[in-house]
Image (cartoon, rainbow, N blue to C red):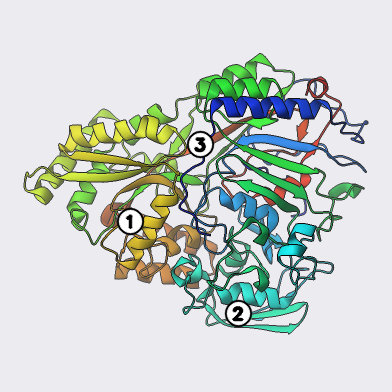
Amino acid sequence: MTLPRPNPRSARSHAVLHRVSRRGFLAASAAISAAAAGVAIVGYNAKAKPPKRSVVLSDSATPSASPVGTRGGSLRVYNFDAMPYDTLDPHQTQMGAIANMHSAVFSKLLRYDDERAGSIVPDLAASMPEQPDRTTYIFRLRDGITFHDTPKYRKAYPRSAGRPLTADDVKYSIERQLNKNSPQGRRFFRRGNWDVIDKVESRDARTIVITTKSPVAPFLDFLAGRHAFIVPADIVTRTDTLATDAAMIGSGPFMLDSFEQGVAVRLRRNPQWFARDDNPGGIGAARPFLDEYVAYYSPQEDTFQRAAFQRRVVDATGFTDPAVLDTERKTNLADIALDETAAGGILASRFLLDRKPFDDDRLRRAIHLAIDRAALIDLMYPPMDGRPSAQLSGPIAPVMGRWAIANDELARRAGYRSDPAGRAEDIAAAKQLWAAATGGAVTELRITFAGIPKTIPDRAVAAITRQLGDVLGAKVSPSTDPTGQVLIGAAMVRNTEGATEGVAPFTFTFEDGGVDLDDWLYSQFRSGQPMNSYRLQDQQIDALLDKSRAEFNADARRKIGLDIQDYLLAKANARLDYCAPLQRQLRWGYARNVALPVWYGHNDTLADAWLDTSPPAWRTR
């Protein structure tokens, strides 16, 4: 879960997940409750009129009332923010929940105001860039931007803590990811975004000029992307990485107090945030309104989470079982709000195409047709209150409607069909392709499943094993990454390096595509790109991807994007895309301006969250 603001202004780690016992969680919960009882959070908007009934948010952009001239308090949630990370370095992380912490701590030149629409607004920049021609972008930085300043940071990095952020920091953060001589060169997974740059110049402390080699349609999207953070050079080690909590020195609305994998993330308010007074409607209080945000790692035990939520140990939580969430929501209609949004991440499988048996496109196609996606959705994401809890997904998540294949069209395609006649055709074709590829020999499929969320090991492993066995007669040998995705991510790096050991030839996990068409397709499927762990090399796809970057007409670019997806589904089958779940959370009504974004990387929006002490539920918190 992350917390977006409805604002009208538009050491690489392979550590195994720290396991927290039920007793540990209960002890922590009791301590939290005791502490909460002794804390007086005062000064909230006494004039606000909270709703008498629940606020059910079918659209996460629905605004809430805002505090006037007041601030304070601690927001506590259950989510995956503390999920084990592949790296602390914001330029080197592949995917996952670590982006939530990064987005609260670090800033970017630009940011997305609305990811679904793709609308971009300034962040560190004082305004959108001047563009004297189609390859030149002139940015001027805002006044008053400083890096975080605490005694801990001053002790660890005295040259960075508290100093002004300058154009040199922007220049460094971009050029760092272009350094092919870096010992971490292969881990700059967005290098393909910056390869289009010809030069970066710091004209003065507040002016940065970026020149691209040729016109690039999504270049502003690169600067607003979920990982385009600006960091000071001093916090980077000699081996070119950010290795410790103390190195998380950014300029964002919150400062990292602590990050304990598998336990909790704690963020503290940055009182010197450059956008603290950018409040809509003449609000007097300086943002962030909260003093603290604490994200406890989800125990993924619905009974326990429900008890903790009812006791106000946490102010918001999701649930594994939609039925439990629905029951809890209906039990407290006067006080509880439901937030939901389609996910911008998709369940998918990657193949390593230069290894047997996946070097045979007939075998990959057979697996694509054999998997019953509708049955998988029903098992993993049961409907809630008669409403679906997931959608079919192609290479781009359906929530990104500007670029994605329409769901009703996708449901008619081979491999996605659920009607009896269509399913029978898919099974027959799958068997024929499999037989042609294997010659009738028993073939083993070693599949590495993500261990988090628990719906994957608990439900997907058996389902995929059964489907591939029943339809194809395949021998499936499943294994589970106990960290979630860290070990899978490391194996994907070895995939791209052409290693012979420690690779992942067949995975089952969540894929995080991003926002723009380029995020979803270019970095994933272009030959030689760091995220192309399939080792896919296809000249036709490469040509279409290059064409999409040069096309500035939105309709024409969408058409190119659909052509690429058609090709990937019909011919390449390097990645099998299954579904995108609906994200849901319950939230006590006193937690305002708290909702769900489409995916990880938006905890900067906590800056507009606040706690309302007037509802009855607050008095028993």
Q: Nearer the viewer, mark 3 or mark 2?
A: 3
* Circle 2: element type: loop
Quickly name the residue at label 1.
568
Give the left or right position of residue 232, taking residue 270 as reference. Answer: left
In the rendered structure, which disc, 1 or 2, sits on the residue that comes first in sequence? 2
Query: What percent of the width, then of the height, locates residue 279?
Result: 85, 51
Q: Residue at x 68, y 64 (%)?
A: 110
Query: What percent of the width, then of the height, locates residue 285?
Result: 90, 47
* Circle 1: element type: helix
Query: Please, is residue 475 above or below residue 356 in the view?
Result: above
In the rendered structure, which disc, 3 or 2, sits on the residue that comes first in sequence? 3
Tell me the number on the disc at residue 134.
2
Regarding residue 372, the answer to whether it shows in the image is yes
Q: Amino acid at mark 2?
A: Arg
Contact between marks 3 and 1 (CB within 8 A): the answer is no
Question: In which image quadrant can residue 535 be found?
Answer: bottom left
Quickly name the residue at label 3.
19
Q: Residue at x 55, y 41 (%)?
A: 262
The C terminus: image quadrant: top right
Question: In which image quadrant can residue 490 be found?
Answer: bottom left
In the image, 98 versus 69, the foreground residue is 98
Q: Residue at x 25, y 62 (%)?
A: 500
Q: CA distance from mark 3 to mark 2?
A: 52 Å
Q: Amino acid at mark 3?
A: Arg
